[in-house]
Amino acid sequence: QQQQQRIYEFQQDLDQMILYVRPPVVKACQIRCVITPTHLQVGLVGADRWFLNEDTYGTVDVDESTWSLEDDDDDDDNTITTTSKNKHNNKKNHNNHNKILCIYLTKANRGSLWDAALKGSQPMDEFSKEQVKADLMRQRMQEENPGFDFRGAEFNGSVPDAREFMGGVKYL
């Protein structure tokens, strides 16, 4: 019998794709994380297999990307997208002392929309994709017009691409 198990959650902004992984360990020195421009590997030091080993959806700026093991404050954020995979192992390791592995993948193409964090994952549905496009566009508008508040801004029709709209996104 296969069991649906959450592997990671993610959210994105103009600059980053952030993955949240619940690790089976509590010390950062036990984690091995390899970030390349097109691939992510996450595992345990000394293990013969990777926990995550997939191509990234977009190109990553490796020099600006990082990861950290942080305290999990159990914040429920509606902008986080959940990704699950089938696992044959029914055992769950809850001995993580409320730690979360945060992987910060800096987008090589600022403002680009990634349909998922990793290519082996289910891409966002069209409704979710439009919501994220709107969030990215509001973030861009806020950056370019700091005296205004765009949090409640709505778009009529199709949301423009934040990376390309009106001359493209600026690099800070």
Image (cartoon, rainbow, N blue to C red):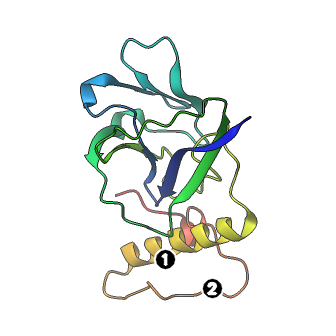
Residue 14 vs residue 7: left or right? Answer: left
- Residue 60 image position (x, y, % from top left): 49, 39
| Tag 2: amino acid | Phe
- Whether residue 150 appears in this view of the structure is yes
- Residue 102 image position (x, y, % from top left): 37, 45
Q: Nearer the viewer, residue 149 or 48?
A: 48
Name which quarter of the figure residue 88 lies in.
top right
Q: Up-down: is 135 above or below 152?
A: above
| Tag 1: amino acid | Arg
Give the number of the disc on residue 155: 2
Q: Secondary structure at mark 1?
A: helix
Name which quarter of the figure residue 143 lies in.
bottom left
Please tell me which residue is depicted at 50% across the width and 70% down the height of the picture.
Answer: 78
Please tell me which residue is depicted at 44% across the width and 24% down the height of the picture.
Answer: 43
Residue 37 vs residue 130: left or right? Answer: left
Q: Up-down: is 80 above or below 156?
A: above
Q: Quadrant of the N terminus?
A: top right
Q: Which residue is mark 1?
A: 138
Q: Quadrant of the C terminus?
A: bottom left
Q: Up-down: is 143 above or below 151?
A: above
